[in-house]
Amino acid sequence: MANFPWLTTIILLPIAASLLIPFLPDKDGKTVRWYSLVVGLIDFALIVWAFYSQYDLANPNLQLVESYSWVPQLDLNWSVGVDGLSMPLVILTGFITTLAMLAAWPVTLKPRLFYFLMLAMYGGQIAVFAVQDMLLFFLVWELELIPVYLLLAIWGGKKRQYAATKFILYTAGGSLFILVAALTMAFYGDTVTFDMRAIAAKDYALNFQLWVYAALLIAYAVKLPIFPLHTWLPDAHGEATAPVHMLLAGILLKMGGYALIRMNAGMLPDAHAYFAPVLVILGVVNIIYAALTSFAQRNLKRKIAYSSISHMGFVVIGIASFTDLGLNGAMLQMISHGMIGASLFFLVGATYDRTHTLMLDEMGGVGQKMQKMFAMWTTCSMASLALPGMSGFVAELMVFVGFSNSDAYSPTFKIIVVFLMAVGVILTPIYLLSMLREIFYGPENKELVSHEVLVDAEPREVFIIACLLVPIIGIGLYPKILTQVYDATTIQLTERLRDSVPTLATQKASTLSFRAPAIGN
C-alpha cells in the first residue's frame, strides 16, 4: 500500500464524484445530499487511513510524494506530497467539509448544483495544501475560487451579488501576484522549474527575494486576511449560508496562513528576516482593530467575521516569531480556529433559521425557548475566547510565550507587542459575552416570539457541534495529540529561518535586538 497514490485519490475522488451528480435519479434533493455526504465520509476516511498508516510523525520532509509529468513543454507536473505543515490542514479540510455537507441538509434551492460545487471544492481545497508544483498551486488556488463565488452568488442573502463580486475581485486580484512570483522564481537562474523544493533550493539575490516576498504577501494577506485587505470577508460572511460559512472560516482563511509559511518563510527566508517585524505589526493591528470593530457590529454574522480576523492576527505573529513554540502556536491557532470558527458560524445559521433576523437588537431572551442552542452557543463562545481547557487557549498561549521568548526582537518591541496582544485577548471575552447576553439573556422579545416559532436544536445540529467540540476540548486538554504531527517540520523550518539572520544563527540565548543582514550583502 506504500505505492498507492493516496493523495491523488483523495483529491480526485470528490471531484470525480461531483461529475456524476447530474446523472443521479433525484427529484427532491434527498438522494443527492445523501450521495454527497457518503462521498465526503469515504474521502475523509481515506485521509485518516493514509495519515494513520503511511505518515511518519518523526519525518520533517515531504511524505506520500507522487509526481507525474503533465505538460512536459512547460515542465508542469502533477506533483503532490504532505509534511507537517500540510497534513493537519488536509485532515481539517476533510473534517470541516464533511460536516458542512451535513449542515447543508436544509438546502432546497438547486440541490444538484449546490452539492456539485461542495464536492468540487472539497477536492480543490485539499489540492491547495498537497500540491508541490508552483504553477499547479496557482491553478488549484484559482479553481477553488469558482465554487465559492457561485455558492455566495446563488445561495447568499440580499446583497449576495455584491459580496460574491467583491470576493472574486479581491482574491482573484491577489492571485495574480502568485502567478507573477511563480514565473519569476521558476525562470530565475540557470534552470527552469516549478517544483517547490527546487525553487526553494535556488540561491536568490536578496533584493529579488524582497520583491517576490512582497508580491506573495499581498496575495496571502487577502486570503488570511490581513488589514487592510480584509474587507471582503465580513461582506462574504454577511451573505453566506451556514455550510459556506463553515468553509470560509474553517478552511479558506487557513490557505493564506499555510501559503505564508510554506512559500514566504520556507522559500524566501532571507526576505522573511526583513519582513518579520512588519508581519508582527500587521498581526497586532489585526488583533486590536478587528476586536474593536467587532464591538460595533450589530449584525451577528459580521460580529463573528471580525472576531475571525482578530484571531488570525495571532497566526501572523507566530509566523514571525523565529521560535519553534511561536510557529507551532501559529499552526495550532489555524487548526483550532478552523473548528471554532466553523462551529460559531454554523450556530449563526441555525439561529437565523429560527429567528429570521441577524440583528442583535431584535433578539433577547431566546435562551428560555432554545436551551440546547443556548448551551452550544455558550460552549463554542468559551472556546473562541480562549477558555483554559480548550484548543484556543493553548494556541494563543504558545504564540504569546513563543514571541515573548524570541531573541529576534528588542525587549521594548516585545513588551509593546505582548501588551497589545493581551489587550486583544481581554477584548475578546467582552464582545463575545456581550453577544451572548443580547441573544439569550433578559426578557423575551415579545414581537420576535409572537412571529417566530423558536424550536430548539435538532439532533443533526447537536451532532455537528458535538463533532467539533470533541477535538476542540481534546486538543485543549492534550495538545500533543496535534502538535506532534507538525513539530518535526516546524523545528526544521525555524532553524532555517534563524540561519537567515546572523545574530540568531550564531547563538541560542536571547539577543538584545533584531538585526537583519544589510541589504545588498
Image: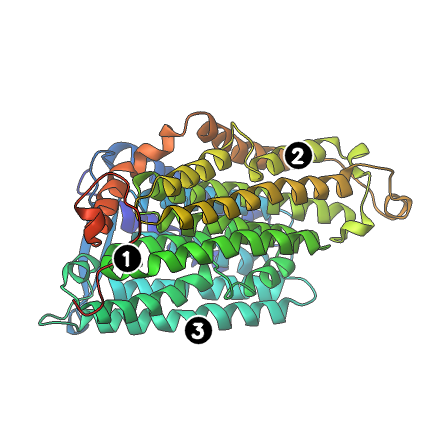
Residue occupied by mark 2: 378
Residue 305: percent from left, percent from top: 59, 54
Q: Which residue is mark 1?
A: 273
Determine whether the residue tagged by mark 2 lies in a helix, strand or loop: helix
**In 3D space, how far apart are the residues under numbered discs 2 and 3 (Cα atoms)?**
38 Å
Q: Secondary structure beneath disc 3?
A: helix
Task: Judge by depth and name the residue closer to the eye, 74 or 322.
Answer: 322
Question: In the rendered view, would you say 323 is above or below 131?
Answer: above
What's the mark number on residue 173?
A: 3
| Image x and y of residue 52, in percent | 30, 32
Regarding mark 1 in the picture, which secondary structure is present there?
Answer: helix
Q: Image check: 200 left or right of 347?
A: left
Give the percent coordinates (x, y) of residue 288.
56, 52
Report if the CB atoms under discs 2 and 3 are less than 8 Å apart: no
Q: The disc labelled 1 sits on which kind of residue? A: Ala
Residue plotted at (40% across, 30% down): 479
The one of 123 and 237 positioned closer to us in this rendering:
237
Nearer mark to the viewer, of 1 and 3: 1
